[in-house]
Image (tube, grey):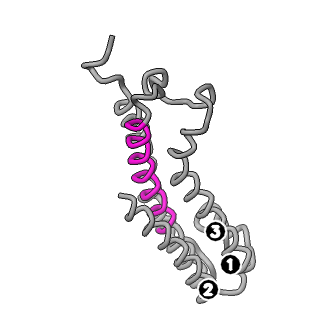
Amino acid sequence: MRNVFLISFAMNILLTVVTLVIGPSEVAIHFGPGGEPNGWASATVNALIMSGVNLLMFASFFFAPHLMRVTPAKWINLPNKDYWLRPENRERMESILMRHLYVFGTLTFAFLFVIGILVLDANLSQPAHLREDFFWWPFGLYMAYTAYWCVKIFLDFRIPKDEAR
């Protein structure tokens, strides 16, 4: 899953570069009701913002399990953390968390890629216009998966039945 996560991140960086190269010099970066643009920026500023967002998200998903090693337990919010932060359970906890973050990160980057394609398409049309009909179903799927993912985290961080007291 790690490789798919890395590829999904790289695809977003590539899309940012493609947008910078083939898009107009001034791009719509925000859209209101009906897909009408209501925020604009230069292509360079847009590329810097998108690169920054992607890099920040990449760092958050990629390094979070590693940061758990050095973060004091009082600052960690995890279901059943007293169990999972025991030295004998930490490696398994990090593995579970890493798997969840790679999957969620991959789907987040996939969602951002779809949005990036829609924004590029909007900026290549005259006049600029976002096709909302192609926005809402990926957004709905992403929100549904986010809800599922949150429940799955709680389920996966239950105390194993054979170790419950």
Judge by depth and name the residue closer to the eye, 163 or 46.
163
Judge by depth and name the residue closer to the eye, 135 or 63.
63
- Give neighbour class at mark 3: few <14, some 14-19, many 20+ (Cα, 10 Å): some
Q: Is residue 24 left or right of residue 66?
A: right
Q: Is residue 19 left or right of residue 99?
A: right
- Give neighbour class at mark 2: few <14, some 14-19, many 20+ (Cα, 10 Å): some
Extreme residue toward the front, this view? 87
Residue 1 image offset from top left, x and y in percent: 35, 58
Residue on which disc 1 sits:
27
Residue 135, placed above or below residue 48? above
**Residue at 48%, 62% in the rendered image:** 109
Residue 93 image offset from top left, x and y in percent: 41, 36
Q: Looking at the image, do the residues carrying marks 1 and 2 touch, with CB atoms under 8 Å apart?
A: yes
Where is residue 48, by image quadrant? bottom right
Specify whether residue 96 is painted magenta: yes
Give the Cα separation between the discs numbered 3 and 2: 14 Å
Callout 3 amino acid: Met
Callout 1 amino acid: Val
Where is residue 87, by image quadrant? top left
Residue on which disc 3 sits:
50
**Residue at 51%, 64% in the rendered image:** 112
**Residue at 57%, 52% in the rendered image:** 60
Callout 2 amino acid: Gly
- Indicate which disc, 1 or 3, sits on the residue closer to the N terminus: 1
Q: Looking at the image, do the residues carrying marks 1 and 3 touch, with CB atoms under 8 Å apart?
A: no
Q: Secondary structure at mark 3?
A: helix
Residue 92, placed above or below residue 50? above
Residue on which disc 2 sits:
23
Q: Which residues are magenta?
A: 91-113
Residue 165, placed above or below residue 14? above
The quarter of the rendered structure image containing the C terminus is top left
Specify whether residue 7 is painted magenta: no
